[in-house]
Image (tube, helix red, strand yellow):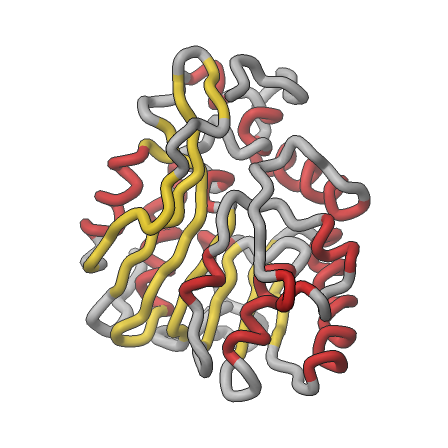
Amino acid sequence: MIDDPGCCGSAPLDQTRAVEDRYGAAAQELETCLCTPVGFDAELLKVIPEEVVERDYGCGDPTRWVRSGDRVLDLGSGSGKNAFICSQVVGADGWVTGVDRNASMLALSREAAARVAEAIGYANVRFLDGAIEALDAPGSDGAPLVADASVDVVLSNCVLNLVNPSARDRLLGNIQRVLAPGGRVAISDIVCDRPVPRHLQEDPELWSGCISGAWQEEAFLEAFRQRGFQDVRYADRSLDPWRELEGIAFRAVTLVATHPSAGRACC
């Protein structure tokens, strides 16, 4: 447990810029203050370039809920590590789409994609430039970034807490929209045991550090239930807080759930 912000400081709030700047820098050089390290299957890491593995920042392993043949959407795909793990799990009959809006992270993941494809013998991964809450945003052809009911699994690793609370309804609506009937979610993230006060929310270092944008633990579950998801639960939940700040406990969880019906409109 950490009782103070540690490597994080304070500055005027600009959430988008704070996230862009911090993760852009983290794509170039390892940043040890982002999220919390998690172990992955070493066999699945062998074909992934070292710089991709080193510059992955997460708080869980949502890839464990991916199956052979799945169509996977990785929200906030970052360096691409989770997507490349999934590419091996789903096999040549499945595919993986990563969505990220950080140019440096996209460059890193896209450059690595060809090397991973050559190592495993097939290419089934693509990385799209976009905000994870705006999967319904139209592209040049007028179609949404990710089509309705086109995904079997939506996963994310310590990214939903970076989305402004005002965009959470759109985010969850889009997750619901893109899932095929019976689709699943596996979302690793940081939650807190009580509300984060305004002055912490206005610190861009704490926001970009996966802290002050954390969802309240029960509210995170309830948000998915209200959208019609079923079997909503924490498959993983750290017993000890990852951090404590001003008496608030922040811990890592992995939320899993299923949706029985076709995607609905996100708005």
Picture coordinates of residue 135 (x, y %)? 46, 61
266 or 214, which lies in front? 214
Q: On the picture, is 153 further left or further right than 56?
A: left
Picture coordinates of residue 242 (x, y %)? 49, 29
Picture coordinates of residue 198 (x, y %)? 42, 17
Residue 199 position (above or below residue 56)? above
239 or 2, which lies in front? 239
Identify the residue at horizontal 22%, vertical 43% (top origin).
222
The C terminus lies in which quarter of the figure?
A: bottom left
Q: On the picture, is 126 further left or further right than 199?
A: right
Marks counted in the figure total 0
Identify the residue at horizontal 65%, vertical 31% (top origin).
33
105 or 140, which lies in front? 105
Identify the residue at horizontal 71%, vertical 62% (top origin).
109
Picture coordinates of residue 58 (x, y %)? 56, 46
Identify the residue at horizontal 62%, vertical 45% (top origin).
57
* Rendered image quadrant of residue 122: bottom right
Q: On the picture, is 37 further left or further right than 172?
A: right
Residue 9 position (above or below residue 142)? above
